[in-house]
């Protein structure tokens, strides 16, 4: 029963990783860009939600603030990483520039947040702290359940969007061949920001749900979540959305179970060894789906 | 020399050595986000061999080179799987490597696990400074050789280098291995400066910063890591000094955020790093090009 | 005169599409041979097969009567084959002289040469050799200049010099005159004639028929991956099949 409880908890935690892993995999798949601002967007949304709630706003209003700031920030990042390099060099992936700029933004966001609120972890008074129910001894937190459902629905919607809509086709054509996409009349300059809006949205939602579920925030929460999300993405294969879902959930469960049985540190070695083996010998991920995008730097 | 200045020079020296560690593979076009891994291996090997209390108590004249050589060996062995990957995959693979190293050390009770490990032999700058000078000179020497030329050719165009007979795989393995050796050296020296090592010092953020030293400094010339490490060591201190001098707290508080702004700005203004070939030519140009070049 | 290069029934397909179909021809030692054909005829593919970037599906290639079909790309420079590229493939961040030194690589590939500080002791023999070949090519510009800043025509010729300094028996030139103005083309021709007179065999892919007529004695014509004609430049320009191929090729491109 205890194991079952841990599995449920792992699934809940994994749903947060899923959203962040999908954000990573989208930018890599579409734009061939490892976006290191993702942990910052996650953290900024979480911190703003906490701060606005602490300032007396309703938590929903606070979450909306967090969401809007993260999406706007993501658009600013687009302008200075991908868009600028693209305009100047034709192919933004030629250089490590977007990567370096995104690291720059990561530093900016973390330190601005530290400057305003300090480095101490803060407690978030969740309105749902006691909203939970029990089925034969296993406790389900309602917000956790909601976030699991949300993340599955969202990602399902996202993949539908990519498959069925005009926008999705445009996005996929950019992922395949940016030059041809331009020739076919896709306005790359207008479509690429959409990827960044999605990134901002997914990270912010993940950040807000994490805050609501686990009731604490700090300027460093993004790093841990992003590291695990990257692991999830690698397991699923870079650029593979369904792979990122499976990978994210798997990592969540492995983390929770291993903390329960062995403590937090020991699990690092097998997980990251697996990661390295996948990257080297099976770069398409464990599930062997075809990837979107060219997946090279 | 004030303790404050000594402190900055110590950090600068360590930053320079670790920057060359990441620079060498980067000069051959391989981005390494695993500097922390090499640093940890070097630091813990040296600490275990040299510590009087919990280690073997060997002299540092032996332990520092052995630690660096051992890290080089690990780097050599790891280079075969890691160099199979490219681009974003290589960044993630080196990052995974660093996480594995951190994970292993955290679980090794013999070196104190998560609580860290004391280093009993303390040195001042008398070891660190000369070693740093030698590392910098070595960086300049290596880049000036045909081996260095091969590295830079691979950076620009691996396939064409291959067609001109360059053993591209061997060169990449060599650059990565020497880089690992220097990373281990930096780790070993770190312990003797700060007397205590713990894995938590060398996380993802550390590896990110070292990669930034190199990419902001520039990968085209051996000046890059030197200037990059100086830039990253001095800018925060300068911002702090401005804050102290003007009494504007904002400077002191903003200095790391300002730093991020500078990085983004640098990428806009000098996307290939501070020290590029053309920039050096402007600095050191001796003669004006003869103009039998006809502009087409 | 013996042959330096023999292609015997060489075939290559990409994804079921036969791009090189049973191609055989010989290149005489010391000759200046051109390989021409409309776009997509397979000229660059032949070059990539020769330099070992692609492996042949069947048939074989021999250099100086030694079968080299199985020799990996990296080793082909050692047996005397060197090339230039259709789009300039100089190392953009290296200086002119360093690019030329890369061409010397297989001559200097011992441990001692690999770790000699070329860049610190500037008066070494490799630098002198490289400088000498640049002067001979009329490219005695500032040798330390990073090549990405040089004009297109100059880069194009530096690429030829880089291939030449490896002392090849056979020099493969992929559209060396493309994009050059008439003066630069003239200078390139002089450079290539000089190389030829010192014994290097030239195999040139080129669109500019005037250039081919001025430089080469022998022409091989490809169309849709097949050899359709072989002869002197004059014969080629009179041959109805070749004219047909070029006109027909254009029609195909348009449709």
Image (tube, coloured by chain):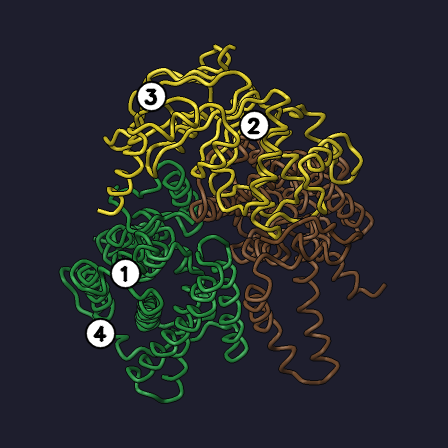
Question: Which residue is tagged 4?
Answer: A131
Residue marked by disc 3: C23
Chain of the residue displaying label 4: A
* Position in image of residue A181 (x %, y %): 30, 58
Q: Answer yes or no: is residue B54 visible.
A: no
The Cα atoms of the two marked residues, 4 and 2, are separated by 69 Å
Label 4 CA crowd tier, 10 Å (few <14, some 14–19, many 20+)? few
Asked if badge 4 and badge 3 are on a common chain, one would say no
Chain A: its colour in the image is green
Nearer the observer: mark 4 or 3; the answer is: 3
Residue at the farthest right position: B1
Where residue A287 sits in the image (x, y, percent)? 25, 43
Q: Is residue A140 left or right of residue B174?
A: left
Q: Could you confirm whether marks 4 and 1 are on the same chain? A: yes
In the image, taking residue B26 as reference, residue A68 lies left or right, namely left
> Chain C appears what colour?
yellow
Can you tell which of label 2 and label 1 is closer to the viewer?
2
Colour brown, chain: B
- Depth check, mark 4 against mark 1: the one in front is 1
Label 3's element? Answer: strand
């Amino acid at each position: 029963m205890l194991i079952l409880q841990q599995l449920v908890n792992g699934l809940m935690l994994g749903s947060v990783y899923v959203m962040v892993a999908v954000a990573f995999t989208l930018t890599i798949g579409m734009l061939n860009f490892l976006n290191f601002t993702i942990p910052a967007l996650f953290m900024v949304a979480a911190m703003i939600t906490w701060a606005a709630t602490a300032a007396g706003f309703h938590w929903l209003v606070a979450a909306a603030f967090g969401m809007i700031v993260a999406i706007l920030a993501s658009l600013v990042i687009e302008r200075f990483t991908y868009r600028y390099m693209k305009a100047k060099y034709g192919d933004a992936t030629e250089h490590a520039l977007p990567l370096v700029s995104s690291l720059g933004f990561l530093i900016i966001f973390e330190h601005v947040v530290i400057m305003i609120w300090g480095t101490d972890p803060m407690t978030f008074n969740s309105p749902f702290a006691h909203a939970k129910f029990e089925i034969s001894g296993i406790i389900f937190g309602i917000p956790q359940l909601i976030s699991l459902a949300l993340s599955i629905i969202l990602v399902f919607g996202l993949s539908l969007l990519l498959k069925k809509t005009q926008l999705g086709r445009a996005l996929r054509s950019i992922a395949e061949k940016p030059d041809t996409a331009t020739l076919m009349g896709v306005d790359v300059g207008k479509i690429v920001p959409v990827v960044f809006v999605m990134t901002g949205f997914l990270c912010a939602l993940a950040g807000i749900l994490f805050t609501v579920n686990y009731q604490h925030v700090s300027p460093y929460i993004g790093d841990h979540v992003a590291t695990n999300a990257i692991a999830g993405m690698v397991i699923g294969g870079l650029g593979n959305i369904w792979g990122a879902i499976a990978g994210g959930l798997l990592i969540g469960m492995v983390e929770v179970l291993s903390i329960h049985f062995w403590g937090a540190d020991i699990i690092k070695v097998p997980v990251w060894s697996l990661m390295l083996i996948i990257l080297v010998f099976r770069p398409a991920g464990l599930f062997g789906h075809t990837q979107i995008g060219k997946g090279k730097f | 020399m004030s303790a404050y200045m000594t402190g900055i020079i110590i950090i600068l020296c360590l930053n320079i050595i670790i920057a060359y560690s990441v620079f060498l593979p980067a000069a051959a076009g391989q981005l390494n986000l695993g500097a922390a891994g090499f640093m940890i291996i070097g630091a813990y090997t040296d600490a275990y061999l040299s510590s009087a209390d919990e280690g073997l108590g060997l002299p540092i004249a032996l332990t520092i080179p052995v630690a660096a050589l051992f890290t080089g060996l690990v780097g050599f062995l790891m280079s075969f799987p890691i160099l199979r990957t490219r681009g974003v995959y290589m960044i993630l693979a080196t990052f995974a490597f660093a996480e594995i190293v951190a994970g292993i050390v955290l679980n090794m009770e013999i070196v104190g696990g998560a609580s860290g490990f004391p280093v009993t032999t303390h040195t001042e700058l008398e070891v660190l400074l000369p070693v740093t000078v030698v590392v910098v000179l070595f960086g300049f020497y290596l880049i000036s050789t045909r081996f260095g030329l091969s590295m830079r050719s691979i950076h620009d165009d691996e396939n064409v280098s291959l067609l001109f007979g360059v053993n591209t795989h061997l060169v990449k393995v060599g650059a990565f291995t020497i880089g690992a050796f220097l990373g281990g050296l930096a780790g070993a020296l770190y312990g003797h400066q700060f007397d205590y090592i713990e894995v938590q010092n060398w996380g993802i953020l550390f590896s990110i910063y070292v990669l930034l030293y190199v990419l902001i400094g520039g990968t085209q010339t051996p000046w890059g890591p030197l200037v990059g490490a100086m830039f990253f060591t001095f800018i925060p201190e300068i911002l702090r000094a401005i804050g102290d001098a003007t009494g504007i707290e904002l400077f002191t508080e903003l200095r790391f955020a300002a730093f991020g702004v500078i990085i983004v700005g640098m990428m806009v203004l000098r996307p290939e790093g501070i020290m590029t070939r053309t920039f050096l030519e402007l600095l050191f140009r001796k003669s004006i090009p003869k103009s039998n070049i006809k502009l087409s | 005169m013996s042959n330096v290069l023999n292609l015997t029934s060489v075939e290559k397909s990409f994804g079921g599409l036969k791009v090189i179909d049973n191609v055989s021809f010989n290149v005489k030692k010391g000759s200046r041979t051109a390989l021409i054909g409309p776009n997509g005829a397979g000229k660059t593919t032949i070059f990539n097969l020769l330099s070992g970037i692609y492996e042949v599906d069947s048939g074989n290639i021999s250099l100086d009567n030694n079968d080299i079909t199985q020799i990996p790309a990296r080793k082909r420079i050692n047996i005397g084959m060197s090339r230039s590229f259709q789009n300039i493939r100089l190392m953009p961040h290296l200086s002119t002289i360093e690019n030329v030194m890369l061409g010397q690589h297989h001559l200097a590939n011992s441990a001692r040469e690999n770790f000699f500080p070329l860049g610190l002791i500037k008066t070494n023999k490799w630098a002198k050799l490289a400088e000498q070949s640049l002067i001979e090519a009329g490219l005695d510009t500032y040798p330390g200049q990073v090549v990405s800043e040089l004009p297109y025509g100059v880069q194009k010729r530096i690429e030829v010099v880089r291939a030449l300094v490896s002392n090849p028996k056979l020099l493969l030139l992929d559209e060396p005159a493309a994009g050059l103005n008439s003066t630069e083309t003239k200078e390139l021709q002089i450079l290539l004639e000089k190389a030829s007179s010192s014994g290097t065999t030239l195999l040139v892919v080129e669109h500019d028929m005037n250039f081919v007529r001025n430089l080469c004695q022998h022409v091989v014509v490809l169309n849709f991956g097949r050899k359709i004609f072989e002869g002197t430049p004059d014969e080629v320009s009179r041959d109805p099949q070749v004219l047909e191929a070029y006109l027909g090729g254009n029609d195909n491109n348009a449709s």
